[in-house]
Image: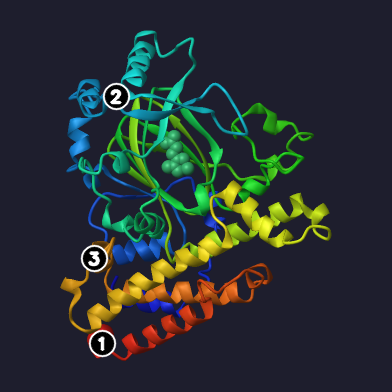
Amino acid sequence: MDLEAYRTCSSLAKTPPRSYQQSCSSHFVDYIDRDLSYSRFFRKYLLPNRPCMFSRTFTRDWTCTRRWVTEEGRPDFQNLLQDFDETSVPVANCNSKENNSNPKQLMTFKEFVQYWKDFIQNGHSSPRGCLYLKDWHMARDFPEHGVYSTPLFFSSDWLNEYWDTLEVDDYRFVYMGPKGSWTPFHADVFRSYSWSANICGRKKWLLFPPGQEDFLRDAHGNLPYDVTSGELKDRGLFPHAEEACQPLEIIQEAGEIIFVPSGWHHQVYNLEDTISINHNWLNGCNLDLMWKFLQSELLSVQKEIDEWRDTMESWHQHCQVIMKACSGIDYAEFASFLKIIADSRMAFLSACCSGEPAEYSRPHSEALAALGPYHAAFDLQRVADIIERLLCNEDFKRLDHSALQPDALLQQIQDCIQSTRGQHLLFQD
Ligand SMILES: O=C(O)CCC(=O)C(=O)O
Ligand SMILES: [Fe+2]
């Protein structure tokens, strides 16, 4: 990040203004087919939370675009089988619906490929329904493969940085689906961004700007499973569907990467036999949207068990436990996520100030170095802003803070920002 981008984002009000009016009326997304600086991507797409598409130039050098794809542009089953053979992979059935998504089962990669070949032979149909290998943690299962690299644009990735630090999980996935497989209507985990690269095949994306999903809810407040279903025309079932804008319809070709912004609900179709790589990620630009999402998740838990509020001791604690079980995170974990992100930036900035960045080594230190000290300073400002908001949140105040001490962390961050600002070396014009 350069000084100008840093100045722009630092001078913005704490929460960036976002307006999706234009996105509702425009049916196009920007197409990036040559050099774009990180700072420009940051200002034009990340901060305003707008989608865009990157051309195949950005994936041309990846090993998987050669190894996993035949000369005709189809999945190279032979090479894929050599690489993954007996690996156990998660597979969804697109023809059955459970809780507004598709039930998944584990099968060996070999078994899935056999199914896929038979599906193709059978004119893209099967008595077993349409199976879709999705949400497979390929990069975690095969760290030595290195068949692709995350483009710099998507490298301010706090979600994977946090989970890598804990060595527990990640949000990096591979999808492989025959023509006709699809993903039902949803927004991504914790309101993260996603980037998704087609290694081969084509996808159709239907994207709705944040807020439009509220028009698409049914009379009980639930989101549709299939946003293209004729049922949405029934006013009794979906009372406000007519008020929603038309979705942005985007065709993604082989090699292209789509940037899906935070909180944009979407539905996705594989128009051909398709392989894609997808990361969910978040950072200082959409952290406020994550925090807003967590508050709404807690509120729905609180409503759900409201009747026990006065009779149950530690009702608030129970709400946190349920929230963690349903959403994968609670307020305490959110605070420790912020701490891990802040700690690595403070260490990075202090290494920069002492002129020893080369000796600095932690997970993701390469990304921090590539993005530079202005980005780290921006990150810290955003963390500080959210900690300030946590500290005045009634539900957060009730939790035990002895382990994390958010006030102390806030002070530390403010001191760090202050002292690095004083370093002419870092922030000179
Ligand atoms: O490609 C798909 O089927 C779904 C991808 C998706 O939902 C995402 O990248 O956020
Ligand atoms: Fe998604």
Label 3, label 1: how many angstroms apart (C-alpha)? 19 Å
Along the line of sight, which residue is nearer the eye, 294 or 11? 294
Label 2, label 3: how many angstroms apart (C-alpha)? 37 Å
- Identity, as a three-letter code, of the amino acid under mark 2: Glu
- Identity, as a three-letter code, of the amino acid under mark 3: Ala
Instruction: Say whether mark 3 is within 8 Å of ligand 1.
Output: no
Please report whichever mark, 2 or 3, sits nearer to the chain's N-terminal start.
Answer: 2
* Residue under the image location 80 percent in, 58 percent down: 309
* Residue under the image location 45 percent in, 22 percent down: 131
Along the line of sight, which residue is nearer the eye, 428 or 392? 392
Mark 3, residue position? 370
In the depicted structure, whether residue 217 falls above or below residue 301: above
Question: Which element type, helix, strand or loop, lies under badge 2?
Answer: loop
Q: Position of residue 50 (x, y in %)?
A: 45, 56
Q: Which image quadrant for residue 363?
A: bottom left
Mark 2 crowdedness (10 Å alpha carbons): few <14, some 14-19, many ≥20: few
Mark 3 crowdedness (10 Å alpha carbons): few <14, some 14-19, many ≥20: some
Q: Position of residue 95 (x, y in %)?
A: 54, 21
- Identity, as a three-letter code, of the amino acid under mark 1: Gln
Please report whichever mark, 3 or 1, sits nearer to the chain's N-terminal start.
Answer: 3
Dots 2 and 3: beta carbons under 8 Å? no
In the depicted structure, whether residue 122 falls above or below residue 276: above
* Residue under the image location 40 percent in, 72 percent down: 342
Q: Residue 428, which numbered label?
A: 1
Number of numbered discs: 3
Mark 1 crowdedness (10 Å alpha carbons): few <14, some 14-19, many ≥20: few
Question: Which element type, helix, strand or loop, lies under badge 1?
Answer: loop
Mark 2, residue position? 86
Along the line of sight, which residue is nearer the eye, 141 or 228? 141
Q: Position of residue 325 (x, y in %)?
A: 59, 48
